[in-house]
Amino acid sequence: MLFLLACLTASAQRYEKVPFGDFEHWTVRFVTESQVIGGQEKTLYVIGPTDTIRGNDPYKYKNTIWSSSNAFAKVMGVVKTSTNVTPDDGPTGKCAKLATEFASCKVAGLINIKVLAAGSIYWGKMLEPITGVSDPYAFMDWGIPFTKRPKAFVLNYKASIPNTGKLVKGTTFRTTEFNGYDAAEILFILQNRWEDEKGNIHAKRVGTAVYHVEKSTSGWQSNFRIPVIYGDARKAKEYKPYMDLISGDKTMYALNKKGKKKTIQEEAWAEADCPVTHAIMMITSGSQGAFIGAVGNVIWVDEIRLEY
């Protein structure tokens, strides 16, 4: 009987691969920075079909649901790039490497901009070119249309979290250090979204699967499973404060039906059986928000899939 029950349980589970979630395929972009900062050709990576693109043009998200913190910026006519998400060698092929690093911009040999950025991958679009650093989330179109109800978010990951006890805030001309701790974050949430008559975007949280990687691993953690909590996650024993509704410094944006950028107003917890309209997925090497983090945090991810 126990053997039969085990077989029935195993057969009831089904895994669905996420497009390009094995990270075997990447689009390579070659962008030439402005002469005033050196005029070098830099490489940006996009998780998507194997392809090569040359030119200082915004990326057109036609064949992939993925974007990242890799940035193509054009501020006051100056073209600048930064890359902290790259392909790397994994156990069975390629994986994605996400690192918290400084991005700097030098003019005439002097550093005039230096910002700290966590390496992040997410479902959605980067609204290129980036034209400022005051609100980096404002250039991200978060989430994709999605109506399914998975049981869990599953992936393989490896992490290096030095945990020196020091955090850095790096914003343009100023860098400060203070005591604190930064974890890598894996976030998968399901929403029910709608627009009002003014085109504003509202949402209720239907499903929550969020996990903080708080320490280094000795190797790859295979088939790591984060269950999706449906309904009010605060009532679940697994609930942690970082699973709460999106607000404050981590405000997210999306394009409405008319193509205008609006804040996603995640207003309440939905009933567990509420229909799902959108999914937001993000994996990042830091969870402190824009421009704050622990330099040296790195997370590698591979084989992302959904369990049903």
Image (tube, rainbow, N blue to C red):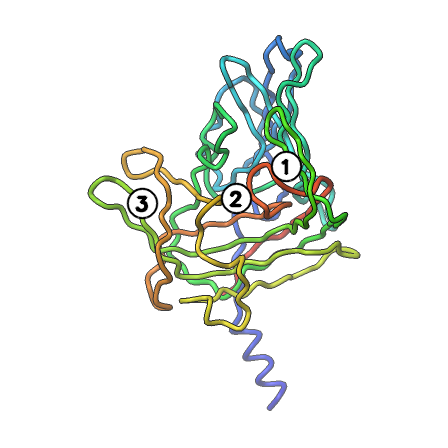
Residues under numbered marks 2 and 1 in contact, where contact means CB atoms less than 8 Å apart: no
**Residue matched to label 1:** 169
Which residue reaches farthest left? 197
Quarter the N terminus occupies: bottom right
Q: Residue at x 68, y 50 (%)?
A: 181
SS at circle 3: strand
Mark 1 or 3: the one toward you: 1
Q: Amino acid at mark 2?
A: Tyr
Q: Is residue 180 left or right of residue 146?
A: right
Q: Nearer the viewer, residue 104 or 275?
A: 104
Sequence-wise, which precedes: disc 3 or disc 2? 2
Give the x, y percent position of residue 145. Answer: 38, 48
Say whether residue 237 is left or right of residue 224.
left
Identify the element where label 1 is drawn.
strand
Report x, y in % for residue 212. 62, 56
Q: Nearer the viewer, residue 47 or 113?
A: 113
User: Where on the picture, by quarter, is residue 197?
Assistant: top left
The amino acid sitting under disc 3 is Ile
From the viewer's perspective, is residue 39 above or below residue 2? above
Q: Compare marks 1 and 3 and give the one earlier in the sequence.
A: 1
Q: Position of residue 143 (x, y in %)?
A: 43, 46
Contact? badges 3 and 2 (CB < 8 Å): no
| Secondary structure of the residue carrying numbered label 2 | strand
Disc on res. 238: none
Residue 147 picture location, percent across and down: 37, 56
Tag in front: 3 or 2: 3
Mark carried by residue 122: 2
Q: Of the numbered discs in the image, which one, if any, rests on residue 201?
A: 3
Dot 3: within a 10 Å radius of its alpha carbon, few (fewer than 14), some, or many (20 or more) residues?
many
